[in-house]
Image: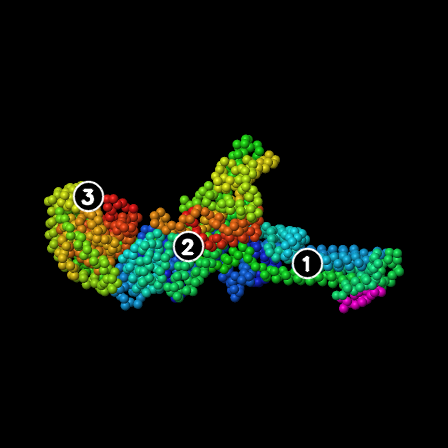
Amino acid sequence: MAVQATETIPVLAIMGHPNAGKSSVVATLTENDRIEIDKRAGTTTRSDEYPVVIDGRTIMVFIDTPGFQNPSDILEWFQAHAEERDLAGAFLAEHGDDPLFSHDCALLRPVANGAGIILVVDGSKRIKEKDRTEMELLRLTGRPRMAILNNLTTVDRHMPAWQDALNKSFNAVREFNAHRATYAERVALLSALKTIDQRWEPMLNETIRTFEHDWERRIDESAGVIIELMRDALTFKVTRVVKVDDLGSEDEREAIRLRLVRAFQDGLRKLELDARQQIRANFRHHVWDLPPDSLLSKDLFSDEVGHALGLTQRKLAVAGAAAGAAAGGAIDLGVGGLSFGAGALIGAAAGGVLGILGGAALAKVDIQRTLGVERFSMGPVTNPRFPFVLLDRVLLYCAQAMNWSHGRKAADEDAPNRVPDRPVSKKQGYTDDLTSVDQKALVKFFAAARAGKRGPHEEQARVIIKGLLRELSCGEVDARLHL
Amino acid sequence: MDPFNRPRGDADIPVEPDSDQWSVPDLIDFDYFVNEDERRARESAAERRRLAERDRGLYRERIQAACGKVPEHTPRHRSQALRRWLSTRRRAEDPALRGLLPGAVYARGQRLVTTWLGVGGFVVGVGVASALLHYDGQHPVNVSWYIFVLVLVQLLLVGLTVGLWYARRRGVIRAAVEDFSLLGHLIKPLFGRTARWVQRQRLAHVPPDVRERAEARQGLLQGHYALYGPAAYLPMLIPVQVFGIGFNVGAILITVALEWFTDLAFGWGSALNVGPETIHAVAHVIALPWSWLFGEGVGVPTLEQVAGTRIALKDPLFLFDADNLRSWRWFLVLAVFTYGLLPRLALLGLSLRKQRRTLAELPFTHQRTQALYARMLTPSLETRGDSGAGPEMPIPAPLQPLTTERAAPREQPPAPPETTAEPKPVPEPKPGPEAEPAPKAETEPKPAPEPEPEPEPEPKPKPEPEPEREQAAEPELKLEPERKPAPRPELALQPETTPAPQRKPTPAQRREPAPKPKPQPKPAQKGEPKPESEPKPEPEPKPESKPEPKPERKAEQRPEPKPAPQPRPAPPARPSLAPGATSPGRKPALPEIAADACILLIHVDVADVLEAEDHGRLQRLLLEQSGWRVAASATFGGGRRMAEQALGLIHDAGWQAPPARVALLQDGSQPPITESLRFLRAVRAAAGEQAQMLLTLVGDPEGDDPLPPLSAFDFGDWQRKIEQLGDPYLRLEMLTGPNEEAV
């Protein structure tokens, strides 16, 4: 509690009555998913400081306070001591050692030290007596103050009343869903803080700039991870050498082929998983994980994924033909995978593969016989659709990682009236919505990656991916959290 | 020149002076460091964070100041910042390994190659020139051949180089240059091979531990010297120029030497009808660059000399004039010097300059470089702090009954008077620092006195509750306006001390009414003595109290309080029944509370949404739950004044069948806070130690139902807190009708 608010460092005490979602707001604003958020009331029982440190310099501090325990008494005391200049300080002086007021003192202490106030109220509930009491007593403190209407549900009929009531006592009122706030909304909230106390402007500007920088860096790194994943996946190969003597019958040969296919798929799954880990860490998630019903939790090679993501066959054919680079893929497309002899076709174990990949084989199985051994090899991926499916998956993952609020872990996802992430749109990935020019560029990139080349196509693909990620973070492109 | 006699390389890798200039070895080292970082960054997120911290740290500590006022994100800033970064990285490198850095190795290799090429060129030049100047005394040296090979061909090569240089941006030419350039195919691998060789030599002369370290360092020894962009081929161009210079120097030196030490005869010939005039004119044209210095007869032969050196195969050599035969010597030297050496020197100079400029203009926008640059410029952003659990929310200690009827009892000041006033010796009221001990203290003494919960099913149906509640409801409506003008300006603390004396008399008053306990026997008369007939105390009351629709429910609920169904052993000990006690300012019309009725306190937030018709339902629900009718009601939760009114009502009511019965209706969707618990304590104090209290919780109305059921989660929250209060006569329930279920 040693924070002395100087004139320049914004110190903001997040207040509200127990359970209003203060901790969620702090967690989301500071992207700290390690803040304990418990749905039980009064989980935060002392004022915890969450400094924002830029280059080792504390530039602003959020203080998560416990909820008010005796709001009426505080208000009455304030009203009775209206002549005090520093009401919060005077209250502390008088009640500092009263255990019954320990929480109230803890939360008023930052205010007494000059902190600004962010009142968090639950906009889904109607205004209660206690809310009025708190608004009034915070008004009496005379500190710069902003109110956050944290509405986690679809119930919005109380919102106008809240707006009116809050406008009377607060310098600024903002709606903010701590469980759904995107990066852009976070930055907007920080910007709004400038309006409640002009002296904070320089520091807040720096904070915002740094947030923006940091975000750009993350997008950059994520795009790098995605490009890397695509390159690795498209050059991935599995080989198995078997002595001819061990190959007794066709059955054994078939078994080996199946194992090869499985190893190939597992390898690709592993690559995807690694990329996800990196992206997850990139966006500072320690707790978040995919909901089990997400499309992303489904197997990479499942039918469902194959249907929902990637390009439609028609678009793929257009892009592929126009790009000219995927001639092989286009041929595969045309003949639906039948171009490979029975031996090259992926076996029955990969039945699902046919669905996802639009009929074409994922990759060729190649068998070479030399000096008493047979080399079974599979890869790299030749299926023209697969890279789009994979890219869609990882983009979708990225979208969810960047749009998943850090304060969301205690969210009641099953509540019937919670805010749906977005109006549910069609089940589809992102690549299908790209312009055909971009799709062509991607096809070229995939072809180059398959050949192990790095070049202008890779840069183009990177630009496309970064653009998409940027739009996602501003909410210009739907994050499709329902997928 | 000995690459391996200085394995440490300390001499040629001086500890970097800070520089903004890039060199090719710098680029190679830079590439190496960036590669290494990239590889590490791929390993884990933690590693990435460390890299980001390191680079940001380097930038802030060493680089930022050095870059001065150059604005960020400009090519100049990028180049400078990255160059400084490289210096710092190199300095931070293990000194033993510094000499093995690819840049150093490459520089050494480049120097070696260049030297070799220079020497090689010299030797070739000597060879070619001496071959051309071969003179056996029979035939004079043919000037035409000398000029053709040493001047014309060289000029052509220079012209080709220059032409390619300028045409290199054109697509076709570029491809041709890339594919067929001698530089790319011969010299580049030569460089790489030499550098690797240098490295091997160095490694061989290094202590084993250093070698191990170097080998452990991935990428350090891979000998991969790829450069990107325009910087890629310039380094190749320079050694070629050196070769050319060596060649020309060799040719010139050997020509001069031969002329010096041997007598050479020069001549020219032609099978065509070319006259000496033509040759003289050509020679003059060739000699233009130096004819101003070395004129006719010195730098260029005269017409006569030209004519005199025309070789006809039929003529023997001795026919020629010896002076004429020598007359070409300086012309040849000067021609090679002018057309062979000077262009090469010029090209070398140009290449060096171009290289420097290219290096200075490198954009460093390669994606990997971008990542590094971004790491340096991006301020490290850290949000710290982890929340911990501090002390739980305070649980108020029980208040001494009799004395406090207020919602907001301030403990300290009033406490002393209260304790003194109390008949009880136990100083419980002190809200010590620990909230927990207090409840215990309370529970312990209690066990003896039994709550005898529903003994007062007096057959007094009271239809009045409705009007009364309306009265009570009035204050709610006024609430908001009231509270803002500070309903009571009294300081919270002082009023308590002042009223305390007033209250002292009350215990006495209450004890007078104590006789009232006598009514208790009534239930016994009507039904059986409750203690014995524990299982069914209700059925009997039912017939009397018509309004009760559901006897079963009550029977179910009753059991809870029953565990101690003894008649109060010490009726006088319950001084809390103070029907007669009036506190100043209270309504004179004191409600008489029948034995089957209770006082209902409704939280303002609930009262706010209750319509007139809802009250009926509320009462019905309450009756089902408790068996009580509502005799009077009041609101609470809106500040002290409201609380005092409510407490006063309890305090002043005329209780029949004494232990008071108070039901509280609270909005359970609001988590319990100290304030709400303190009000419960105050009610307890006002109603009496063994008064029956029922706290019913409703949910927050979202639809049309003003009394929705409470979620199990919220109920659990309350349950925990109520348990901590440790009040054995306080029952917590959800207000649910027979058809309503807790969500």
Give yes or no for contact between labels 2 and 1 (Cβ–Cβ under 8 Å): no
- Residue B550 - label: 3
**Magenta stretch encompasses residue B304:** yes
Whether residue B294 sits left or right of residue B706 in the image: it is right
Q: Which residues are magenta?
A: B290-306
In the image: residue A466, left or right of residue B263: left
Taking depth in this image into account, of B374 and A35 the one nearest to the observer is B374
| Mark positioned earlier in the residue sequence (3 or 1) | 1
Q: Amino acid at mark 3?
A: Lys
Using the rendered image, report if marks 2 and 1 lie on a common chain: no
Mark 3 and mark 1 on one chain: yes
Q: Position of residue A330 (x, y in %)?
A: 55, 44
- What residue is drawn where x is 54% and y is 50%? A441
Q: Position of residue B159 (x, y in %)?
A: 70, 59
Is residue B659 visible in this depiction of the protein?
Answer: no
Quadrant of the image occupied by residue B487:
bottom left
Question: Which subunit holds the residue at mark 2?
Answer: A
The crowding category of the residue bearing disc 3, from other C-alpha atoms within 10 Å (few below 14, some 14 to 19, many at least 20), is some
What crowding class fits label 2: few (fewer than 14 Cα within 10 Å), some (14-19), or many (20 or more)? many
| Quarter of the picture holding the N terminus of chain A | bottom left
Chain for mark 1?
A: B
Q: Give the amino acid type for the residue marked by disc 1 in the picture.
A: Gly
Instruction: Locate residue B208, reporting x and y percent.
Output: 58, 50
Amino acid, disc 2: Thr
Residue in the foreground of this view, choosing between B342 and B601:
B601
The overriding secondary structure of the stretch rendered in magenta is loop
Residue with the mark numbered 2: A182
